[in-house]
Amino acid sequence: MSDRSHALYSVVGLAGVLVLVSMACSSSYITPARLTATANAAYIGTTPLPTAFFVQPSQTPSPQDANNATLPTIEREPLAPDPTEAVSATPALAPALPVDASAPPTLYRAQAGDTLKALAVRFGVNPIEIVSEKPIPDHEFIEPEQLLMIPQRIANTTPNQHLMPDSEVVYSPSSADFDPGVFVESIGGYLSDYTEYLGSTGQTKGADVIQRVAIENSINPRLLLSLLEHQGHWVFTKPNSLSETDYPLGHVDLDRRGLYRQLVWAVTQLSIGYYGWREGDLTDLVFTDGISIRLAPDLNAGTVALMYYFSQIYGFEDWLTVLDPELGYPALHEAMFGDPWVRAAIAEPLFPPNLDQPDLILPFLIGQLWSYTGGPHGAWEGEGSQAALDFAPGSLESGCVDSDLWAVAAAAGLVVRSSTGVVAIDLDGDGNEQTGWVLVYLHLSSEGRPPVGQWLDKSDLVGHPSCEGGRSTGTHLHIARKFNGEWIAADGPIPFVLSGWRARAGDAPYLGTLELGDELITACTCGSFDTNIKREDPNAKSTSDESQAEQP
């Protein structure tokens, strides 16, 4: 089915529900004051918070702005993550409880990116129970602001206040002209003098490490900078301890020591929260003290990303304090960069109504033999949005071997990034990877890779498949899509379709199929005959057509 209408029972009934909901819409949410006496306590000690350098949305401050700034202070107690804290055998917080059957339903306005499936999971209901006066699509995005009526089935959830816009978590249009390097240098804190050796770029400035992780994972650099300041005091001052120096994002692990590894860990947690919520795979948080709690079903993906991140480094009570909108991390972020909701008013919704994928072709030349080796899986790091597909060129050898076959542009666009193993093609041609549709290719060899600024027509060469860039056990091509900075799930509301082949997810990452009519190709790294795929010439006549044309 495409669309179906979930009819309301009667106008009179809806009016009665409206009255009931207005009296009880938030009574089931746990608030900091209700759960812990320390939730509203002020932080002890004094740490200066920076004045917001905010002139217009997404502008970067000048050094003069920083030099003339005055730093307000708020009282706060430093909260140090304790990796050795014992997990409570009996969690102090009860799991989500069912609501009495007589409870009035929730009136919910759809947010950009909502789907019927995800909403049903979040609210703990059957999809057929979600009703609206307007048709609700079964699989596509629901129109933002559409009013839905949903049975109230769960209680004892997290607070439902939205703490961070989606556009402030993903690398969206609101940060297209934000320069982390200029910002960091204008402040002059510890990060401005920091360098770290990376295998692909050598000795690298701290701000460049931030930018690299941000653009590769499509996570907002503003968010990374404020998290770095909150956890490690790297931006405005300097670390207060060896732990903050070695583990500036709060995750104490010898294998994650240093800025780059800490950032990679952090963006992974943010992505798990953001896309897990978006795609309906995440409903609960588990804290370092063993407590678990159900996420309020009407949260936005950006807020859940933060909630999940902090749940990985704090116990429940400290988590509540850190996320206090007035005294915790959200206040610090706003003090650094201005009100994120002002920027969001310009950049959102990230998904406009009736968004469709542009026409895309299989990313290789007509007639060449390739294998479908990877179904939907992580766009960049292994976890997060299942946005990517993998193809391997036909070869008599396995492993990382040179290939003479070419990957091609699946659509026309402007090359906006071309670096180790990577090519990003901006389909709207405005030169910003943060806006509109973008195709990201990974594991392209340096030979034949187009430079930044080159315009590519559909089917133009973009390079040879290889093992360059990222982790790889064999020569292949990895391709994913973004829109307005958000990764688009390959088997989601806007499915990945290449030359008519539609991607379907399997039971685990990298599994799945490509479907075209009655034809089916199952992904497998084995490169067997069953995985073979060719891009056909759309102008070529089939053999049967030619034979019929030859008959008198």
Image: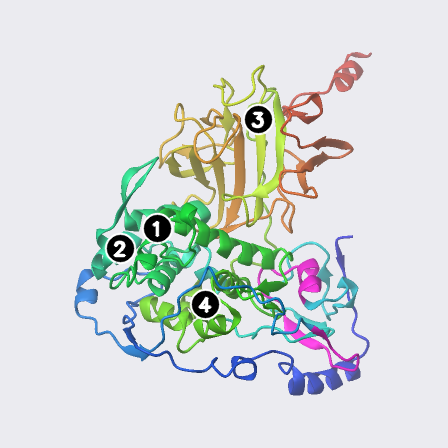
Position of residue 201 relative to residue 71, above or below, is: above
Query: Residue 327: horizontal and vertical position, in percent?
Result: 39, 77
Image quadrant where residue 100 sits: bottom right
Q: Are marks 2 and 1 in contact (CB under 8 Å)?
A: yes
- 225 left or right of 533 in image: left
Residue wearing tag 2: 191
Q: Disc 3 to disc 2, how far (Cα)?
A: 40 Å
Disc with the residue nearer the chain's start (4 vs 1): 1
Q: State the extent of the magenta-drawn residues as a range.
A: 97-122
Say which amino acid is labelled 2. Answer: Leu
The structure residue drawn at horizontal position 81% and vertical position 12%, both measured from the top left corner, is 551
Can you see residue 133?
yes
Q: CA distance from mark 1 to mark 3?
A: 31 Å
Residue at the disc numbered 1: 210
User: Which quarter of the figure has residue 342?
Assistant: bottom left
Residue at which label 3 appears: 392
